[in-house]
Image (cartoon, rainbow, N blue to C red):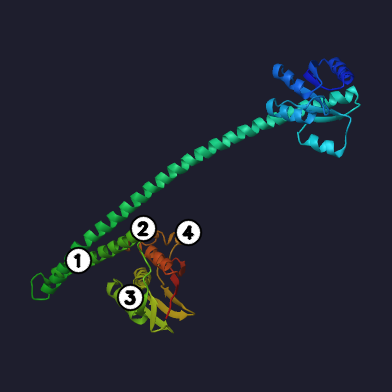
Amino acid sequence: MFPLRILITEDDHVSALLLKKALEKNNHQIIGISDSGEKALEILAEHHADIVMMDINLAGELDGIRTTEIINEKYDIPVVYLSASSDAETLTKVVGTNPSAYVIKPFNIRELNMVIELAIFKDRKEKELQKLNNELEEKVRQRTKDLAEANKELTRALEKEREIGELKSRIVLNVSHGFKTPLTSILSSAQLLQKYAEKDHPFKAKIMKHAEKIEHSVRNLNSLLTSVLFFGKADANKIDYKPKKLFLNALINEVVDVVKAGSENDVKINLKIDKIPKTITSDSDLLYQIFENLLSNAVKYSKDGQSVEFELMEIEGYLQAKIADHGIGIPQEEQDQLFDRFFRAKNVGIIEGSGLGLSIVKKCVDVLGGEITFKSKPNEGTTFFVKIPITK
């Protein structure tokens, strides 16, 4: 074992000398012998010690236990107790000072050296562990500080993103509203041209043809702007559920008439209404968006001569709708994107569309607290199932 600087604190002079002699045989250096706690502290104030051999019963006012407590506070040096007593009360007091070891007198040199070696080893490992704990705590403090700074940056970025989102929504709403007025004027002019062309005119056929093209394009653009306006409001959290009493049959018939009037292909709509209340309380605008978009898509993606089934019923406080077509269907690998904004399946070809209709439907169904599901196979058609809570 490597040599140590040892302080002996023992009030029995003979025992202290025997202990000194035994320790010096193992090349340890004795920096002092004290018979009281006060003298031991004086020696430690002037000389460094690697370990203190401490008797419990000492001369003076400080006993070994109190002296050890002071050594722990001021010097953090390992202490090995020496005592002829092993009663429970003494052991309890000793444990409270966290000693490095406890040796019962009389002891032999071999055991003493082993105890000292273990005490030094224990002390060093505890200090290494404490150092690691301190380093870990410092790292945790630094990581916590870094995380706090990162959170501040994230909060600032999110706030900036929110401001940009609000600005974008205002721009979308303002620009869309700005387009609405001239589009209305263009549509009115196109309808007037058709009226004028009803009279005899050498270019009647051409005027009617181009007026119809203008009207069709304006209606498509108007529909697109309506969709953009809808999502402008959605992004600004301005879509509210506004329930009111409405005549359900009238709403459904209006949807069917509008879809038929805007259809460019020869597709039959088979409407089946079964056991629905005459009036319900819900949001008519949101219901109209749901059924108009679903039915328009079903007709648009069907071929001439095909039919679309539109079934409606009320079951246990839920309005349940089924809209089925036999058209082009949706590729399996793209079905999970169906309700994404601006998504259009790769098999739509040249069929016009903005890719916003089903996104609007999903948003409206969510606002109403309902559910929407579908099943589809390419070239076999698509069926949508809508379930919306209502009150009568």
- In this picture, is 324 found above or below 167? below
Q: Quadrant of the N terminus?
A: top right
Which type of secondary structure does the marked residue at label 3 adopt? helix
Q: Position of residue 182 (x, y in %)?
A: 18, 62
Q: Does residue 387 appear to the left or right of 176 in the view shown?
A: right
Q: Counting other residues with Cα less than 10 Å from the Cα at mark 1, is it few (<14), some (14-19), or many (20 or more)?
A: some
Foreground of the two, 160 or 117: 117
175 or 158: nearer the viewer: 158
Q: Which mark is residue 255?
A: 3
Compute the Cα span from label 1 to label 2.
26 Å
User: Residue flagged by tag 2: what amino acid is it?
Assistant: Asp
Residue 95 vertical position relative to residue 289 in the rendered view, above or below: above
* Real-space CA distance between mark 3 and mark 1, rounded to the nearest whole angstrom: 21 Å
Q: CA distance from mark 1 to mark 4?
A: 40 Å
Q: Secondary structure at mark 1?
A: helix
Q: CA distance from mark 3 to mark 4?
A: 31 Å
| Residue lying at 35% horizontally and 52% vertically, measured from the top left | 165
Q: What residue do we see at 33% from left, 53% from top?
A: 166
Q: Which disc number belongs to residue 184?
A: 1
Inspect this view and state whether residue 349 appears: no
